[in-house]
Image (cartoon, rainbow, N blue to C red):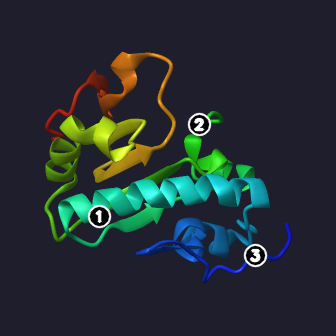
């Protein structure tokens, strides 16, 4: 896909490598190097993540950032995933609390922090927070919870 410097800082606390790193891609031999246009999108995503980090005053761990199409298919992502466009990251902030705690804290701040969409996800026993720079077409989908039981508006406790 070309050469990019994965050590490039996209924001004070986030590097390009952090937003494209994937153990799944490594294990499957998938090149998850983003094209230049996606790197520019990742800059905006990193800026959003930096605002989240600064607001929560805790380190933000990116568990999934950019995914090329092949990686997105391999992890079972939807074809319209914001991850493929470099506009999303799945995060954990263990120093702040559970994913529910993080999502509850961020929900009233989405506009201020430049979060287009905030999703508390709890699927298959795993929990994380999905943040995207893209604002969904339907305002009701801006802050949602997705679990094995389905999708609910707002941030709901995940059992």
N-term mark: 3 or 1: 3
The answer to whether one can see residue 103 in this image is yes
Q: In the picture, residue 8 is in which quadrant?
A: bottom right
Few, some or many C-alpha atoms within 10 Å of disc 2 (few <14, some 14-19, many ≥20)?
few
* Distance CA(mark 2)–CA(mark 3): 26 Å
Residue 37 horizontal/vertical position (percent): 75, 54
Q: Residues within 10 Å of mark 1 (few under 14, many from 20)?
A: some
Q: Which mark is residue 4?
A: 3
Q: Is the residue 74 above or below the residue 92 in the image?
A: above
- 129 sits left or right of 24 in the view: left
Please identify, in this view, whether the residue under mark 2 or under mark 3 is nearer the observer: 3
Q: Residue 78: give its label.
A: 2
Tell me which residue sits at (70%, 54%) in the image: 38
Q: Is residue 44 above or below residue 31?
A: above
Of 30 and 45, which appears nearest the observer? 45
Determine whether the residue tagged by mark 2 lies in a helix, strand or loop: loop
Q: Residue 11, relative to residue 124: is it above or below?
A: below
Give residue 19's quadrant in the image: bottom right
Q: Is residue 157 above or below residue 125?
A: above
Question: Tag 3, which secondary structure?
Answer: loop
* Residue shown at 48% from the left, 42% from the top: 133
Tell me how far mark 1 sits from mark 2, CA to CA: 27 Å
Quadrant in which the C terminus is drawn: top left
* Residue 110 horizontal side relative to residue 75, left or right: left
Furthest-front residue in view?
112
Marks 2 and 3, the one that precedes in the sequence: 3
Identify the image quadrant of the N terminus.
bottom right
Quick check: 82 left or right of 135? right
Residue at mark 3 to residue at mark 1: CA–CA distance = 25 Å
Q: Residue 139 falls in which quadrant of the image?
A: top left
Horizontal side of 84 relative to 150 (left or right) equals: right
């Amino acid at each position: 896909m070309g050469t990019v410097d994965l050590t490039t800082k996209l924001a004070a606390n986030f590097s390009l490598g952090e937003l494209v790193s994937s153990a799944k891609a490594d294990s499957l031999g998938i090149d998850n190097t983003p094209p230049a246009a996606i790197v520019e999108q990742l800059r905006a995503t990193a800026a959003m993540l930096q605002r989240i980090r600064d607001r929560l005053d805790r380190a933000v761990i990116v568990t999934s950032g950019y995914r090329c199409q092949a990686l997105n298919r391999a992890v079972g992502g939807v074809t319209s995933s914001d991850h493929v466009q470099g506009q999303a990251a799945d995060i954990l902030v263990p120093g702040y609390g559970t994913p529910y705690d993080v999502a509850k804290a961020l929900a009233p701040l989405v506009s201020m922090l430049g979060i287009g969409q905030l999703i508390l996800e709890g699927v298959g026993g795993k929990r994380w927070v999905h943040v995207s720079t893209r604002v969904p077409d339907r305002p009701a989908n801006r802050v949602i919870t997705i679990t094995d039981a389905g999708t609910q508006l707002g941030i709901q406790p995940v059992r």
